[in-house]
Image (cartoon, rainbow, N blue to C red):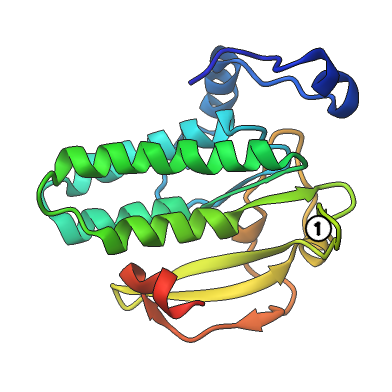
Amino acid sequence: MSNKQVVSRKRVSDHGEVYTSEREVNAMLDLVKQETERIDSRFLEPACGNGNFLIEILRRKIEVVTQNYAKNQIEFERYAVLAVSSIYGIDILQDNVEACRKRLFDLFESIYKSLFKSSFKTECLNSVKYLLEHNIICGDALTLQTVGADPKPIIFSEWSPVNGNMMKRRDFSYGEMMDYAELGPLMESVLDAEGFLPEPVKDYPLVHFLRLSDDYQ
């Protein structure tokens, strides 16, 4: 994890950007330690920067997956993909979003390939990359819209395992979710609030977890 807290004075002035240090990240996450080690607990960081909180959450989740499923490749893949699918982030700067996605993907890839050097699946890597492209969004958590020439409401996908190898995707409006849950000062698993979600804006058919990038185009 990078301990550099400031990229430039201009970014601090323009965006109030100051990264949280590794010590502070771990101290804050330890307050909800049990949740950070639950594979399917969903976390949303509304100002994720380049991913200091999210990388540590994923690291903790993947450690649990490794401890339990390192000797069974398909089980490792299934639960590791589930762990990735549970992590969400928003940042107003595109370079932060890209850096965050890359850090999370690189962490997953390095652990996955170290465990399954000759048998790792490109399809699994593609599913993880696809999830990160949809879960880490360039947007403004205050306006609830994406950033760019044509801002649109931020949409997040809920990914749920069904019947072992299948996954169910439902898309929700971030703005509507905020009507149902208050966002805490650090982060909050707002997508876990069963019974408090609005109707999905889109519902998708089941798909194999190794075919997310193929079937959800």
Image spot of residue 60 (x, y percent): 39, 34
Instruction: Please tell me in which quadrant of the rendered image residue 63 appears.
Output: top left
Instruction: Please tell me in which quadrant of the rendered image residue 3 appears.
Output: top right
Image spot of residue 123 (x, y percent): 29, 64
- Direction from residue 6 to residue 114 in the image, left or right: left
Instruction: Please tell me in which quadrant of the rendered image residue 81 appears.
Output: bottom left
- Direction from residue 45 to residue 173 in the image, left or right: right
Instruction: Write the residue at 53% across / 74% down.
Output: 169
Asked if one can make out residue 85 in the rendered structure from this viewpoint, the answer is yes
Circle 1: residue type: Met
Q: Is residue 102 above or below residue 79?
A: above
Label 1 Cα crowd, 10 Å radius (few <14 / some 14-19 / many 20+): some
Q: Is residue 200 above or below residue 3?
A: below
Quick one: 178 or 171, which is closer to the camera? 171
Image spot of residue 64 (x, y percent): 30, 40
Label 1 belongs to which residue?
178
- Direction from residue 190 to residue 73 in the image, left or right: left
Quick one: 67 or 172, which is closer to the camera? 172
